[in-house]
Image (cartoon, rainbow, N blue to C red):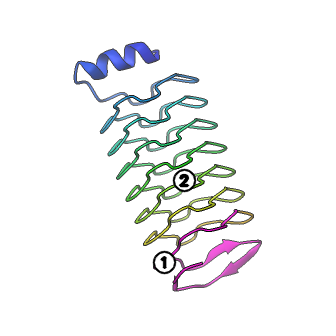
Amino acid sequence: MNAFELLSRVAAHQSDFPRTRLHDACLQGTNLSRINLRQSDLSGSELSGSDMSGACLQEANMTNACLNDVNLVGANLVDINLIGAELIKADLSGADLSRGDLRCANLTGANLSGANLVDADLSGANLTDANLTDANLIGTDITGADLSGTIMTEAFAIKVKAYGMSHRWISWAGC
């Protein structure tokens, strides 16, 4: 399936597309809210400015995808591969990113408030000016991540792996 066919089917009110191959697809600025792309390949795809709120992207491959200014509010991103993805100013509030692989992802200015990041790998990620208020960071790996200006008020984090050490925190009240 290509991007044009997907968008045609979405326009016809279809939303179930598990295991779809959309490598390098251009889907910028599209409405893909509540779409099911579970286990799909969206690596290298351009999705900036898209509405993907409530989408199911569980186990999807989004390596090196461009998701700047994307709306992923409440999305299911469990076990997602976002290695090297760009998520600048993305809204991931309330999203489930548990066990997600976000190594070296750019999350500058991203809203991750209330997100579930249990056992996620954020090593080497850029979280500059990101909002992690009320995020669940239990078991999250932030080794080598850039946390400059990151807001972590009331973030829940026990046994976070940071800079090669294991830390035990109950909560962070600012950073």
SS at mark 1?
Answer: loop
Q: Is residue 88 above or below residue 160?
A: above
Q: Which residue is mark 2?
A: 100
Residue 25, position as x, y percentages in the image: 53, 22
Q: Earlier in the sequence, mark 2 or mark 1?
A: 2
Q: Quadrant of the C terminus?
A: bottom right
In percent of the image, x 31 and y 37: which residue is there?
A: 33
Q: Which residue is mark 1?
A: 153
Residue 144, position as x, y percentages in the image: 75, 64
Residue 11, position as x, y percentages in the image: 27, 20
**Would you call the spot at circle 2 few (<14 residues within 10 Å), some (14-19), or many (20 or more)?**
many
- What's the amino acid at mark 2? Gly
Q: Is residue 121 above or below residue 157?
A: above
In percent of the image, x 52 and y 50: which residue is there?
A: 89
Looking at the rendering, the stretch of residues picked out in magenta corresponds to: 146-175
Q: Is residue 116 above or below residue 20?
A: below
SS at mark 2?
Answer: loop
